[in-house]
Amino acid sequence: MEPTPLTSGRDFIRQIIDADLASGKHVNVVTRFPPEPNGYLHIGHAKAICLNFGLAAEYGLKVPARCHLRFDDTNPEKEEQEYIDAIEADVRWLGFDWGEHLYHASDYFQQLYDFSEELIGKDLAYVDDQSAEEIRATRGSLTEPGVNSPWRTRSAEENLDLFRRMRAGEFPDGSRVLRARIDMASPNLNLRDPALWRIRRAPHPRTGEAWLIYPMYDYTHPLSDALESITHSICTLEFENHRPLYDWAVDNVSVDCKPRQIEFARLNLTYTVMSKRKLLFLVKEGHVDGWDDPRMPTLSGLRRRGYTPEAIRDFCERIGVAKRDSVVDVQLLEHCLREDLNRRAPRRMAVLDPLPVTIENWEAGRVDWLEAVNNPEDESAGTRQVPFTGELFIEREDFMEDPPKKWFRLSPGAEVRLRWGYLFTCTEVIKDSAGRVERLCGRIDPASRGGNAPDGRKVKGTIHWVSAAHAVEAEVRLYEHLFAIEKPGAERDFLLDINPDSLRSVSQCQLEPALAEAVPGTPVQFERLGYFHRDSRATGLVFNRTVTLRDTWAKEAQKS
RNA sequence: UACCCCGUGGUGUAAUGGUAACACCUCAGUUUUUGGUACUGAUGUUCCUGGUUCGAAUCCGGGCGGGGUAGCCA
């Protein structure tokens, strides 16, 4: 090891590990990410994944280090193979690799069982015949101690016999549990003789019908960690009160490894909900279109929305790790996304709300192929040819008949640049009988091909356009936050806080021809509008808006 | 009103007894063939109260505030 590392500027977890390495308590670092396969992974899990796998990668530069993926599959009633598969795919997509170290708590059932016989032999566990209701009633309350079970003083022989018969299936579901014998008067409720095993005749995705009893999390987790030689077992704050029980388990059975549990604050994000229960509810009740709905904070939803693993990892790094409850501004996530997409997304022109424009001084039938830069941030992205003709579509909102101050897009008599094309002046506004603008006519400056004024005159506004004859049609889905307020559910049922405009689907958008070949999974910028991403599930040409561009004009316009 | 944890700009995170910093947000400006990007600048912070100390965001006491915990869920 290097001389004592600088602990300054590091989060509290890294400081703990630094100290453990410096003191010689550990010579390696082993972490784990332990999801329960009862739902899809979300951005909050990404924080834990980046932390645990990131720690292994970081410390791996100096000492042996690794991170395990372990499924915490001890409750077959809620867990499914579909979730197991999705979780593995999501962790990989995020960019992490567990190598050989894929584990399941269910792999340890036999060892966990043997440890329980050991506990029984030490008079540290007993079989309780009370019902769940009776146990609840005798647990006491936050301010009152619990009451000992009448079965608490059974002999080790009797407990052993009963426990073996529990396993053998001699008793009905719920009729008995194995309990730790700790202290029914402990101020920590978790220590009031917690259940260790319960009888449950439910088929398990991995062990099938082999087990009729299943171990509890509080018992399974510390011992699974110990069996895998985990050095630092990182979990979220709500397990803080469980730590004494965690330590009790590893201290009282024959394992030689004593992992340390460290708790950190889970991620909360503005304008979204993060609990699996709520996300499952949104899916089941049809408020969204499945776990991978682009509005969901799930990794599969973010992926379908167009988020990149790089942006998510960057975000997880920037939010830091601490113990205080906090709510991160979703704008930071969006910032990380834009920063990444700005570097990599090729630019294209797309008109979402088309307004026809006729260029009067353009020879009928003439097509001019213009060179357009693919990405000003990346010269290697090259250029492409876009067709320019006398009949174009521009964005309806880029024209105003009576523009406000500071408006520098199109208006009657005003000159704008058609991106990569010509300088254009609107000379006539044609309306339908209802007074709605139907079409614009105008003239281009033939000497301004490419967009440069021949005499150097300043043209402030640049707008995007497509040639009507060449445009391809597409559906574009405009997403906003799923919830309308920063902290959904804070004041009332979270469903009431759902944003009714979280999805606006626009059909018959007019796109430049290159977009017909857009590939799902690769981002593209629609110039002046935002970053988009061809939907991976829809047939036909459908784009999801990943995130808008920053829009200072929208802000300016909002002021008045 | 039992036990545990946590209080630093609007938000998130640093500063580990020695000038309170970084990022996001907000605002103002420069550059710009995207009202994008980039760049510059500005506003704004240690919950309160005693104590220890030459010196406290940091250590100690007392308050106050927030969160967690009473599944045979994880």
Image: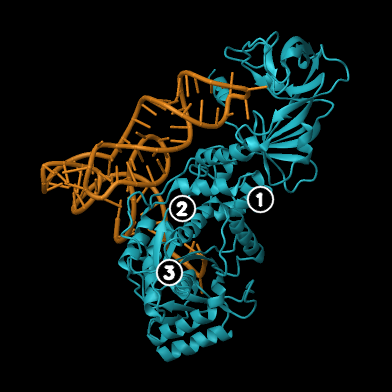
In the displayed structure, does residue A116 sit left or right of residue A551? left
Determine the secondary structure under disc 2: loop
Q: Which mark is residue A292?
A: 1
Q: Mark 2 or mark 1: which comes first in sequence?
A: 2
Locate the C terminus of chain A and report the quarter of the image it occupies.
top right
Residue at the spot 51% in from the left edge and 46% down from the top edge: A314
- The letter of the cyan chain is A
Labels 1, 3: one chain:
yes
Name the residue beneath numbered marker 3: A137
Which of the two residues, A378 or A228, is positioned nearer the viewer here?
A: A378
Residue A507 spot, x, y in % from top left: 77, 34
Please report the residue visible at 49 percent of the width from the left and 69 percent of the height from the top: A217
Q: Which chain does the residue under circle 1 lie in?
A: A
User: Rounded to the nearest whole Å, what is the CA distance between mark 2 and mark 1?
Assistant: 22 Å
Chain letter for orange? B
Q: Amino acid at mark 1?
A: Asp
Q: In the rendered view, tell whether residue A394 sits above or below residue A194.
A: above
- Towards the viewer: A132 or A244: A244
- Chain under disc 3: A
Marks 1 and 3, the one that precedes in the sequence: 3
